[in-house]
Image (spheres, rainbow, N blue to C red):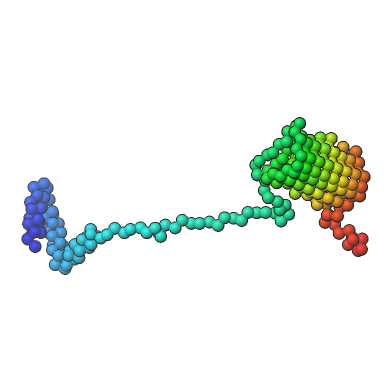
Amino acid sequence: MSFFKDFKEDLSTAVNEMLPGEDEKQVDYLEESAALDEDSIEDGRMEDLTNELKNAAFAEPVKESKDDFVIPTYNKAPEYRAPHAPQYTPASEENAIITEGMTITGNLESTGSVEVRGTLNGDVRCNGKLVVTGVINGNTQSAEFFADNAKVTGEILADGSVKVGAGSVLIGNITATSAVIAGAVKGDIDVRGPVVADTSAIVMGNIKSRSVQINNGAVIEGFCSQCYSDVDLQNVFNN
């Protein structure tokens, strides 16, 4: 107890010297503060406070566990594919070119696109687009087919569209999902989508499709059937 009494007396003297005239009020305030401190010690509350400070000072720091940080994972959305999409292997970015004046004898297969400017005596199969501006003597299979001022003798099978430009001559059947004919075709055309015969088109063969558009000037020698349309012809006439 002597420590607080000595501290009170020293503090009272310092306050009286600094603030003359207010000494009585300051002394009363200090006496009340000292009394509260003595009561706290007598009640044991100061001892509890000291113990809490010691525990806080010597307590081990809390270590953060790696389990506290969880990186969220997201399920990748499934790739959308239309139900009518062709089931062929996606084409690579490679592009094979048979230049003008070049003649190749034998079959040709590529994971990318192929452009034939020269002459190819053999079958062609590619996962990309087949562009012909030269001559092919053989069957072809590709994702898309385009002929411009070309001559092709053989079957043409495409997972997508077939376009026969003006000045082109194709001798063989065509199977695709859509077709635009502006050149000459001798063979049957089997397309589950639309067929457009342009003004310069000449077709010697039957056409099976969903719809047929024949422009003025086109010549069609064969039977046209829209067997892939949504109209049930038998049901219409029976009713």
Q: Residue furthest bottom?
A: 43
Q: Residue at x 14, y 57 (%)?
A: 29
Question: Where is residue 148 shown, x and y percent of the image?
Answer: 79, 36
Question: Where is residue 52 shown, x and y percent of the image?
Answer: 22, 63
| Quarter occupied by residue 161 | top right
Q: Residue furthest top?
A: 101
| Quarter occupied by residue 119 | top right
The image shows a total of numbered marks equal to: 0
Front-most of 135 and 225? 135
Q: Residue at x 88, y 62 (%)?
A: 235
Q: Residue at x 69, y 44 (%)?
A: 110
**Quadrant of the snapshot with the N terminus:** bottom left
Question: Where is residue 74 shown, x and y percent of the image?
Answer: 53, 56
Front-most of 68 and 41? 68
Question: Where is residue 68 shown, x and y percent of the image?
Answer: 40, 59
Q: Residue at x 83, y 54 (%)?
A: 228
Front-most of 56 and 170? 170
**Quadrant of the snapshot with the C terminus:** bottom right
- On screen, residue 5 above or below 183: below
Decide if residue 54 is on the left or right side of residue 213. left
Q: Is residue 95 visible?
A: yes
Q: Is residue 145 visible?
A: no
